[in-house]
Image: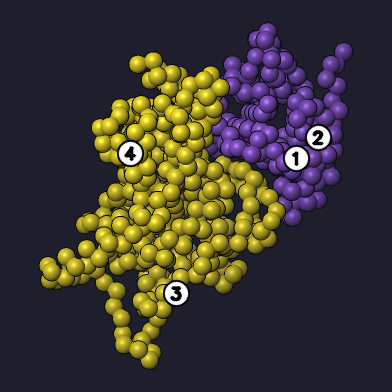
Chain colours: A purple, B yellow
Amino acid sequence: MIMEKNFVIAGFGGQGVLLAGEVLANAFMLANKYVTWYPCYGAEMRGGTVNCEIVVNDSEDVSAVNKKEADFVIALNQASVDRFISKIKKGGWLIANSSLAKEIRTRADINYLFAPVTKLAENLGNIKMTNILALGLAAKVSKLVSVETLAEALDNVIPAHRKHLLPLNLKALKIGYEYDLLPA
Amino acid sequence: MECLTKTNKKVLMKGNYAIANAAVMAGCECYFGYPITPQSEIGEFMSGKMQELNRAYVSAESELAAINMVIGACSTGAKAMTSSSSCAVALMQEAISYASADELPVVLVSVMRGGPGLGNIYPSQGDYNQATIGGGDGDYQNIVLAPSTVQECIDLTYKAFYLAHKYRNPTILLADGLLGQMMEPVEFGEYPYPEIDNSGWALTGAKGRHGRVIRSYAPLAEDQCVFLNKLFGKYKQIEENETDWEEINTEDADIVVVSFGSPSRNVKSAMKICRKEGLKVGILRPITLWPFPSKRIYELTQSVKKFLVVEVNMGQMLRDVKLAVNGAAPVEFFNRPVGNPPEVDDIVNKIKEIIKE
């Protein structure tokens, strides 16, 4: 049986949505999966909305694109929750940033993980870690990629002149991954 | 973005960067271009890499200038290219006709976006006709290659340089905005083709030999007749040698779906779903849009009941499929005018609708 799963990552321009997708896609590549990343690109600017989709499958074959449904939606702001909640597959997951989105569960047939991602990143000392923190959450929830592979992918993606940010990114990844899935 | 000369490591790369890096690895000596979304990363990559390698990069003042600079470089036998998108490739049509007449190995990467006119920057296949038929004057024909994955963007960029030089003919790599922006794991093998000897025609200075002229002007009608017959003899040879396509599950197919480029990915998925449900569906994906696999499509009419063409335009390859089928079977059409490819479920539903009829 061929496994094929897809992720949508969405948020404000500047939140690192496309980069998070690139790290995730790199991780799948390192795990020897067939993976496709594509952005919804438009005439957007900083502060506008942005999203990308990552399709991963086990086979050697190319993936379809422009999918009707998503297994996992990572929404970093309210606009992204509103736009993509209807796209989530029955039994799929909404991973949402409760710092910037309301904890409202409008569908009964999907799973939710709300976490104050922006706040957690601020606590870590750099709000720019929001995207990688969210990836940690997604890794835990999806069980499709290990935190070690994501760490390796981060090293792949972060360019030489930004390598000093790698340790903080790895910390963000770990905080996301270890965030309690069922808070009291 | 680093240039990858190492060949056996998988890297995750955007289509545009993959095309640019492949061009560098194919030995492209000169790049001339003018930025336009959704292919600007090609010029961006070249602007750094070509200088680093001591090759030529010119940010031209317009697309018109860029393609004419390619003509100049190619006339010296150099491997030269430009890249652009829809409304800007439109500006290059006159020069492409000249390059065909001058028999120059021009490589043009066309990453399609929405048209007509300024249109928009979303993916499209609206320039099938622009590439395969063209808007220049006179009788001429470009070689047109259509990738559907990022890996194929690399493989067909290599091939574009090879075919352009082998046949001294303008060659277009026809991608779309989705492929240009998409990232997939890829590998860069060594440039797999032999180098073509151009010492018999290139303008390299006439030291020790008679001077040469490359021009498309033939004042006597008879001369132009001889030239055109020779040119079309070459086109016939290209048709015989280079026509390429991918074919899956056509042996027992009742319906064959014909699509090219990025939508063919969704067509492939749709076919798999149909097969699981016992529907006899096959696919044919032209890789060379010219030469078009007309002969093979006509052969299939012996056993296939219906054809379905899926495109992201208003029906351009549709005409070539109809010409190939030549009335021997019905040819249906399913499209999205512009944007991302039709969704898999919608293609499946269309196939089922056609089967019922």
Q: Count neighbours of disc 2 (C-alpha within 10 A) and say few if under 14, some if 14 to 19, many if 20 or more.
A: some
Tell me if label 2 and label 4 are in contact, CB under 8 Å.
no
Binning the other alpha carbons within 10 Å of mark 3 as few (below 14), some (14 to 19) or many (20 upward) gives few
Dot 1 or dot 2: first in sequence order is 1
Three-letter amino acid code at disc 3?
Asp
Is B69 rendered above or below residue A173? below
The vertical placement of B297 against B205, above or below, is above
Q: Is residue A137 left or right of residue A92?
A: right
Badge number at residue A146: 2
CA–CA distance in space, label 1 to label 2: 9 Å
Q: Is circle 2 on the same chain as circle 3?
A: no
Horizontal and vertical percent position of residue B136: 26, 55
Q: Is residue A23 visible?
A: no
Residue at the disc numbered 1 = A31
Q: Earlier in the sequence, mark 4 or mark 3?
A: 3
Alpha carbons under labels 2 and 3: distance apart: 52 Å
Tag 2: amino acid:
Ser
* Residue in view at x 33 percent, y 43 percent: B294
Task: Identify the residue shown where x is 37% and y is 78%.
Answer: B200
Q: Viewer-proximal residue, A47 or B21?
A: B21
In the picture, the disc for residue B103 is none
